[in-house]
Image: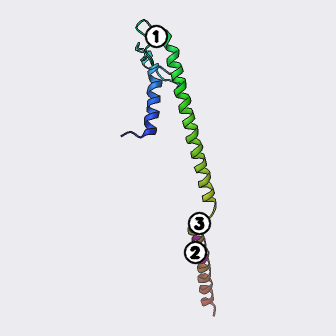
Amino acid sequence: MVPRRFAKTLGAAVLLVHVGWTGWPGAGKGLAAEGVSPAPVAQAGEGASLASEGPVDCRELARLLEQQKGQLSRELGQIKRELGLLREDMARPGLKEIVAGIGYILGLAGVGLYIHSRKASRRP
């Protein structure tokens, strides 16, 4: 099963390729370059031309892009809040860091006392 977030992004990408969006450098023309016309969003009738349905597709595409932009803005805001909380949490030392610091200090003191005792035992 495809995750929901990925499926929405994949759907938008397929839609963009389908209508021939060329926003990326080196991107192809999509199906429009191959002579395949995009499927109309709404059937206007038998006598309707593709030119009259073109703006409908663009409006629908713009609406979908605006929806996705709003959703991405909300998700990005949530990620920024979570990063801020993580930074606050990381700024304060926890119990693990305090115990490690005390152990480091005691280790250095132990090495210093060992060197001092070695020098003291060599003196006559």
Residue indicated by mark 2: 103
| Mark with earlier residue (2, 3) | 3
Q: Is disc 2 placed on a helix, strand or loop?
A: helix
**Residue occupying image coordinates x 61% and y 65%:** 93
Above or below 117: residue 9:
above
| Mark with earlier residue (2, 1) | 1
Q: Amino acid at mark 1?
A: Leu
Q: Position of residue 10 (x, y in %)?
A: 44, 32
Give the CA distance from mark 2 to mark 3.
14 Å
Give the CA distance from mark 1 to mark 3.
65 Å
Residue indicated by mark 1: 50
Predominant secondary structure, magenta span: helix
Q: Amino acid at mark 2?
A: Gly
**Residue occupying image coordinates x 45% and y 17%:** 42
Q: Which residues are magenta?
A: 99-107
Label 2 CA crowd tier, 10 Å (few <14, some 14–19, many 20+): few
Colour setup of the view? rainbow
Q: Looking at the figure, which quarter contains the C terminus?
A: bottom right
Left or right? Give the position of 2 relative to 23: left
**Mark 2–mark 1 CB contact (< 8 Å):** no
**Mark linked to residue 94:** 3
Labels 1, 3: front one: 1
**Mark linked to residue 92:** none
